[in-house]
Amino acid sequence: MAQPLSRLKESPSQTAGPYVHIGLIPNFVGIGGVFPEDLGATMVNAKTRGERIFITGTVFDGGGAPVRDCIVEIWQADADGLYPSPSETRGTADPNFTGWGRSHADPETGRYRFETVKPGRVPFGDGRMQSPHVSFLILARGINLGLNTRLYFGEEAEANAADPLLGRIEQKDRVATLIAPRSGDTYTFDIHLQGPRETVFLDI
Amino acid sequence: MKPRQAWNSPRETGAFFPRDRAWHPPAYTPPYKTSILRSPQRALFFFDNTISEITGPVFGHGILGERDNDLIHNFAKPGESAIGRRIIVHGRVLDEQARPVPGVLIEFWQANAGGRYRHKRDGYLAPLDPNFGGCGRTISSDDGAYSLRTIKPGPYPWPNGVNDWRPSHIHFSVFGSGFAQRLITQMYFEGDPLIAIDPIANTIPDPAALDMLIAPLDMSMTVPMDATAYKFDIVLRGRRSTLFENRREGN
């Protein structure tokens, strides 16, 4: 008998449910006075370096209806391509940038929205540079394990075409589901949970 | 608005162990009806973690208020407290190598003692408790430990089948030290007969996995004449050591 590996299993996921707002953004649903502000509502301040942008979009279910009760979280590098995280060993990120944001679908329109800066490039595992991107996590009632995807920027056609991750997606016509077109200072990134336009979701 | 860096985690730079997706609930679980239209149908695209997944946000203890992990009092009027059976929930945040995961933000939310959420979408006839908000948060300590004080949430009916009831449960959101380690789950209570017939708990295929979400009564941590205790450890993905990994020169 060999020694046991003595590994634990990860706790299994459960849906965030319909009342996820109570836990993650209580002020938004009228539970005031517990936390001074909802976490992740602000990513930047007046001193944040880089190009100020907005990211907005709608998460659609398999019937084409907006998922009006979802929460969207994003994580991205700063304008110089550094993450504000202890696991970032390449340098020190902009102290005026959180890198992390949390938004919710508007209960009427279903649209989420972030104000942030355009991220710089960060390396892939083999050292090649990745195209600028923003990591997404989608949580909602009916989603048993949070869904991960990435946003890439529409005007970065050349970098997107050479990106090591996008280049590995076999069904080339699906790459477009990850690319957000730009209009002024706003990128629109709609996410389709099912159907012919299903977004490429990532097993990270 | 105060972006700032406040590290209290060790500098970990390894990729996370792959997620065992047979252990987690699948996306499409028809007895839980809302999953039917909200489940991706195509294969997930996998790749080894890059720095975008290995890194993640860290929250300093500075964000915490004194009563953030005390749901009995954090929404109550001065001198009053929430109605219900007083309990303590405590445990540790560990990774798959059984190492403590310190410094991670844990958020929790729940229904009140009657099974009613303070949310405009909840129309259950059980009344709101004016002294109960239903949310709290804490940060794991150096040994991964965390605790909260609350009232035991009630079970409640929900529109899925004609007569479906959620067992008593507390929702947990855990950050971990990297974006790929993030986990949302629910804690159930030992001995609750509603767990076995709950369409949501039973989205988890392996009974041994569901057992990980059922907190036992822990008399050793009770406060006599005040509150009973339940133990709930949370296990996040482990991460590889980077000691002998091939790295490009200068990377």
Image (spheres, coloured by chain):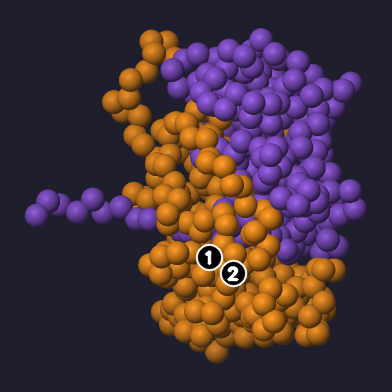
- Left or right of residue A167: residue B156: right
Q: Is residue B209 visible?
A: yes
Select label 1 or label 2 by which is in front: 2
Single out the residue that lies furthest toward the bottom. B225
- Left or right of residue B131: residue B94: left
Q: Residue at x 62, y 67 (%)?
A: B32
Q: State the quadrant of the N terminus of chain B.
A: top right
Task: Tell me if residue A190 comes above or below residue B69 in the rendering.
Answer: above
Q: Is residue B112 visible?
A: no
Chain bearing tag 2 is B
User: Quick one: label 1 or label 2, which is nearer the N terminus?
Assistant: 2
Q: Amino acid at mark 2?
A: Pro
Q: Which mark is residue B203?
A: 1
| In front of the other: A85 or A61 | A61
Element carrying mark 2? loop
Neighbor class of circle 2 (other Cα within 10 Å; few <14, some 14-19, many 20+) is some
Chain A's colour?
Answer: purple
Marks 1 and 2: CB-CB under 8 Å? yes
Residue B185 in the image, given as x and y percentages of width and height: 56, 60
Q: Residue at x 82, y 77 (%)?
A: B123
Task: Tell me if residue B164 comes above or below residue A13 in the rendering.
Answer: below
Q: Amino acid at mark 1?
A: Thr
Chain B's colour?
Answer: orange
Q: Which residue is mark 2?
A: B31
Chain bearing tag 1 is B
Residue B203 in the image, given as x and y percentages of width and height: 53, 65
Indicate the quadrant where residue B29 lies.
bottom right
